[in-house]
Image (tube, rainbow, N blue to C red):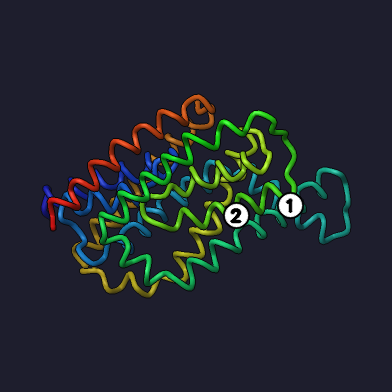
Amino acid sequence: MNILDLLRYLLLAIIQGISEVLPISSSGHLALFQALLNTNAGNEAIFALLLHVGSLFAFLLFFFPVIWRLVSHLFQFIRGQRSDAIQDDMMLILYLVLATIPAALAGYFIKDVIDQLFQSLWIVGVGFYFTASLLLIIPRFARLSYGQYTWKNTLMSGLFQVLGILPGVSRSGSTLLGSLLGGLTLAKAKEFAFLLFIPITLGSFIVSFDRIESFEPSLLTYSWIATVVSGVVTFFTLKMVFQYLNLKHFKWFGYYLVGIGTLTLLLAFLSL
């Protein structure tokens, strides 16, 4: 095992674990740093998917109480129980399904295009700028939000999640902002946006599983190690975000993305 290669993959795993939860685009950061570290040429999107699987396990662990409650209430609903809590959770499940459909369809039909976009730092840089603009503008319109899930705010979340398919556009950030724009409080928006990560990532892994076999075996070993590290870092970043993230922080992430977007475009220009 090459220690230098392993360190590269561990660095990418840490970047994934942090940037998946924060609204700064894990896909963009992975594409940028894979280019800088000269790793996974031509397989950037597949490696990113593996790291997202690590994040997926972290999300499942973090939201286990919520998931267990939803599954329990689903079976109780099937058995004919109709308490207010059960009916509320049945609506939440329907909202999650509804919000997942747009990104699932988009990801299925354009997955090959997305793989190619991962190799373009120009696209990544523009994606960073786009996410920055969302972070700097949309929170200003989130002051009159309320705490109830509706068809409007959950569908808005799902439509904004489609944007996160593109490298450089934050999935968590765009989904959070879509939820806020649709009328959710930040607390509800965080819960719904991160719950949405679970079905879309699971679906992406299932659809793309056969392509993982094209990875070089030695690189696949590094990738699975990185996947575990990605999960650990994601879990602790989630805890931090749910405890500390508020609307005032969004503008600072926006400023950061302007800076790294500029760096990305500069690197794209120099590589011509």
Q: Earlier in the sequence, mark 2 or mark 1?
A: 1
Image quadrant holding the C terminus, namely bottom left
Q: Name the residue type under label 2.
A: Gly
The residues bearing labels 2 and 1 have C-alpha atoms spaced at a distance of 11 Å
Image side of residue 141 versus residue 201, left or right:
right
How many labels, in total?
2
In the picture, measured across the screen, residue 35 lies left or right of residue 18, that is left
Which dot marks residue 158?
Answer: 2
Nearer the observer, 30 or 170: 170
Residue type, label 1: Trp
Return the residue nearer the eye: 121 or 88: 121
Q: Residue at x 47, y 37 (%)?
A: 135
Closer to the camera in the image, 22 or 253: 253
Q: Residues within 10 Å of mark 2 (few under 14, many from 20)?
A: many
Whole-percent x, y for residue 237 in the image: 43, 35
Is residue 18 placed above or below 103 in the rendered structure? above
Please tell me how crowded label 1 is: few (under 14), some (14-19), or many (20+) other residues with Cα within 10 Å. some
Query: Which image quadrant: the N terminus?
Result: bottom left
Viewer can see residue 6: no
For label 2, the SS is helix
- Secondary-structure class at tag 1: helix
On the question of residue 194 being in view, the answer is yes
Residue identifier under label 1: 151
Residue 178 position (above or below residue 159): above
x, y (%) of residue 133?
A: 44, 40
